[in-house]
Image (spheres, rainbow, N blue to C red):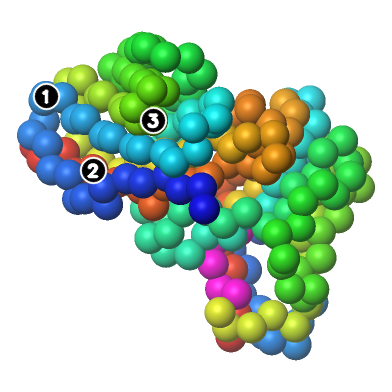
Amino acid sequence: DTEVTQTPKHLVMGMTNKKSLKCEQHMGHRAMYWYKQKAKKPPELMFVYSYEKLSINESVPSRFSPECPNSSLLNLHLHALQPEDSALYLCASSQGEGRLPQHFGDGTRLSIL
Amino acid sequence: QKEVEQNSGPLSVPEGAIASLNCTYSDRVSQSFFWYRQYSGKSPELIMSIYSNGDKEDGRFTAQLNKASQYVSLLIRDSQPSDSATYLCAVSGAMDSNYQLIWGAGTKLIIKP
């Protein structure tokens, strides 16, 4: 069991749907991350929140919209996704942005029809 | 461009032997180094972090860092079939990159019974 919890574990959606991915951590970490991972590739950074403020947006298309309601929660809102957006979406957290290790949730397997 | 390189494998090791995984990085000012294990379809799991030159041991795992030669390695002693996974090397960048992780492509390790 990981200390970073992601829901749902699996999501299938059409290109016109709106859905949200959720991430929660109770380790007191102040940095939270969204990654996208395709098969046989390393994780690809999408967004970083530090102290609940967006600090990094790696040129992610606007159909992905992050939100950090509080220090424990991180959401990723999805709208009008494309089939190539099908991937494993990973949330991670760390004590602070920087040199400290990141701990990952189990991920959400997203399939776009 | 800052890079982290790993041999993609697969690396095949007999059960009970020592598995040796290597990683080189290009950014000389990198400060933090991590090894993650990822089983197929699962999320990355942190197994070792190392910050200074030399060896760091944790159970059957030993991480080795040589900043002068810009490489970091992971040794797994008494390899077990359950160690079969992809091992990802991640290096924390410098301050100008907000210390974000740069990932290697991963080495697939197969432990043969």
Q: Which residue is mark 3?
A: B70
* Mark in the foreground, 2 or 3: 3
Query: Where B60 falls versus A79 (above or below)?
Result: above
**Residue toward you, A32 or B15:** A32
Is A88 a magenta residue? Answer: yes
Earlier residue among tags 2 and 1: 1
- Same subunit, tags 3 and 1: yes
Q: What predominant SS class does the magenta segment belong to? A: strand
Would you identify the image quadrant in which residue A17 lies? bottom right
Q: Secondary structure at mark 3?
A: loop
In terms of depth relative to the viewer, which is nearer, A89 or B104? B104
Q: Which amino acid type is shown beneath numbered disc 3?
A: Gln
Residue B109: give its label.
2
Q: Which segment did they paint magenta?
A: A85-89
Looking at the image, residue A7 sits to the left or right of residue B86; the answer is right
Image quarter (top left, top right, bottom left or bottom right) of the C terminus of chain B: top left
- In the figure, is residue B11 to the left or right of B52? left
Residue A79 place in picture, x, y as percent: 78, 77
Mark 1 lies on residue: B16
